[in-house]
Image: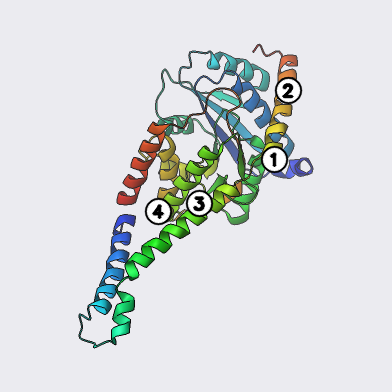
Amino acid sequence: MTKLLQWLFGVAVVLAVWALVSFDLLDLSLPRPYREAAWPMPLYLLVSLGCYSLATVGYRVATFNDCEEAAKELQEQIKEAREDLRKKGLKM
Amino acid sequence: MASRKAPKNRDSGNKYSVLLPTYNERENLPLIVWLLVKYFGESGYNYEIIVIDDGSPDGTLEVAEQLQKIYGEDKIVLRPRAKKLGLGTAYIHGMKHATGNFVIIMDADLSHHPKFIPEFIEKQKEGDYDLVSGTRYRGNGGVYGWDLRRKLISRGANFLAQVLLRPGASDLTGSFRLYKKKVLESLVGRCVSKGYVFQMEMIVRARQLNYTIGEVPISFVDRVYGESKLGGNEIVSYAKGLLTLFATT
């Protein structure tokens, strides 16, 4: 099963449960408050997914390490390498 | 630390072939080779460096020939090609001549530092992983030389890919990895994507085939010499590639 199908399957299951509860498709005679709570759920779900995504990406951007040390180390090693290679007879 | 273990590592029977695809890397190639020789020398692992130059007009191959004279034909192996072809075929081409049982792929532009290779090797041994991937997104990993826009795009693109593909690895587009040679052989033939997406496809297919993946945090120092590119075209082709993988794997 491709990832696309897995997603479609998941979305279909959620939508089915949602429709069952909010339109009382199985005549379970659920109390009215249940049905009223279920009705806007997909929208809440979407909004919270969006918030979660933004927060996660924002946090990860903010905590993305800047490797100043690594850059400095590399620059020094480049100098060392150039000198050593010249000694070994490399014509750059 | 590593130098004490030298004799043991040399006798392990493992050999690591480093594949270096190059195009106009005359400045960088001697430096990356020098660093590779340094760190392999210190850690004592058996290795070879395979330079796959795609007909660089700047004389990269000439420099590579000089390096071969300095370090020896057993250490520096030249497998040039006449013109610029895809990355996947470069790996296939290089692997044909690789004598190691492990293959390390990395960029020759100094954004990937050879000091991490001993860590890759230790990690691989730790769990007998089929592949070990360097990651900029975990632990002490990170980047240098990226502005906020670049970071945002990178994190956003990676998050999207994580959500859609759930690949079980944190850095999908990184190209600093160690593979068991057999694993790379079986993967590379299946992967058809280009550019950034190629590396992502390699990881996704690896997961599909139930290969085990280890990760090592790396610092990615963006190109010291030459331009690093991330424009609209890259973003569009990334999105296309991601959706293709989403629909087909």
Disc 4: which chain?
B
Report how far apart the C-alphas of labels 2 and 4 lie in the structure: 42 Å
Quadrant including the N terminus of chain A: bottom left
For label 4, the crowd category at 10 Å Cα-Cα, with few meaning under 14, some 14 to 19 and many 20 or more, is many
Q: In this picture, is A1 found above or below B145?
A: below
Are dots 4 and 3 on a single chain? Answer: no
Q: In this picture, is B124 found above or below B95?
A: below
Circles 2 and 3 in contact, beta carbons < 8 Å: no
Kindly identify which residue carries mark 2.
A79
Q: Mark on residue B165?
A: 4
Report how far apart the C-alphas of labels 2 and 3 lie in the structure: 37 Å
Q: Which of marks 3 and 1 is in front?
A: 3
Q: Mark on residue B64?
A: none
The amino acid beneath tag 2 is Lys
Q: Nearer the viewer, mark 4 or mark 3?
A: 3
Within the image, what quadrant is residue B220 found in? top right
Q: What element carries label 4?
A: helix
Q: Which of marks 2 and 1 is in front?
A: 2
Q: Nearer the viewer, residue B52 or B219?
A: B219
The amino acid beneath tag 1 is Arg
Q: Which of A52 and B215 is in front in this view?
A: A52
User: Looking at the picture, how far across and down is residue A33, in whole percent?
Assistant: 32, 83
Kindly identify which residue carries mark 3.
A57
Report how far apart the C-alphas of labels 4 and 3 lie in the structure: 17 Å
Report how far apart the C-alphas of labels 2 and 1 lie in the structure: 29 Å
Q: Would you say residue B209 is visible in this rendering?
A: no
Disc 3: which chain?
A
Report how far apart the C-alphas of labels 4 and 1 lie in the structure: 39 Å
Left or right of B242? Residue A58 is: right
